[in-house]
Amino acid sequence: MFIPPRALQQQMRAAQQQEQAAVSLRTSHLVIPTAIADRIFGSTFNVHLVYYPQKRSLLIAGAENELFRQLHKSKQHLLKAGDAQGNRSIALHELLIDNGIPAEDRTLAYEAEDALGVLNVSL
């Protein structure tokens, strides 16, 4: 099957953009792309997170979100500036070990709730 070079380049660019916009687990760190982190957390570098093992769901909100902190028994974590692209990361070593979650590198499904300021990641 012949794929015209221009169409192939467009497909490759689209795949790269989608990969860059994906939340992923790398070396036991949750890596959040800049576009998502800026939308949800703004300029804060502290977040509250809680993991619900029944749903395999990790909920993350900015530290200034008092309602989230009161509704969920969350722990505060550092939202680190990750790499040259501006991606941010959260260390999840303890959470992965405590809940028996595989730590291999992978892309994760997520929902970004802009109105609530919450990121819901499926582990």
Image: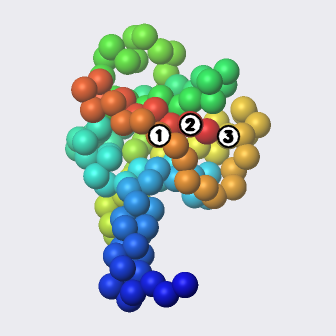
Q: Is residue 98 above or below residue 71?
A: below
Residue marked by disc 2: 122
Give the residue furthest to the right. Answer: 100
Q: Secondary structure at mark 1?
A: strand
Q: Position of residue 77 (x, y in %)?
A: 46, 36
Q: Can residue 13 be seen in the rendering of this structure? A: yes
- Identify residue type, mark 3: Leu
Say which residue appears at 32% left-offset and 47% top-offset: 36
Amino acid type shown at disc 1: Tyr
Q: In 3D space, how far apart are the residues under numbered discs 1 and 3 (Cα atoms)?
A: 17 Å
Disc assigned to residue 110 = 1
- Image coordinates of residue 32 in percent, x first then y, are 41, 50
**Residue under circle 3?**
96
| View extreme (top): residue | 71
Residue 53: assigned label: none
> Closer to the camera, 23 or 45?
23
Label 3 to label 2, Cα distance in Å?
A: 13 Å
Q: Quadrant of the C terminus?
A: top right
Alpha carbons under labels 2 and 1: distance apart: 6 Å
In the picture, measured across the screen, residue 7 lies left or right of residue 59, that is left
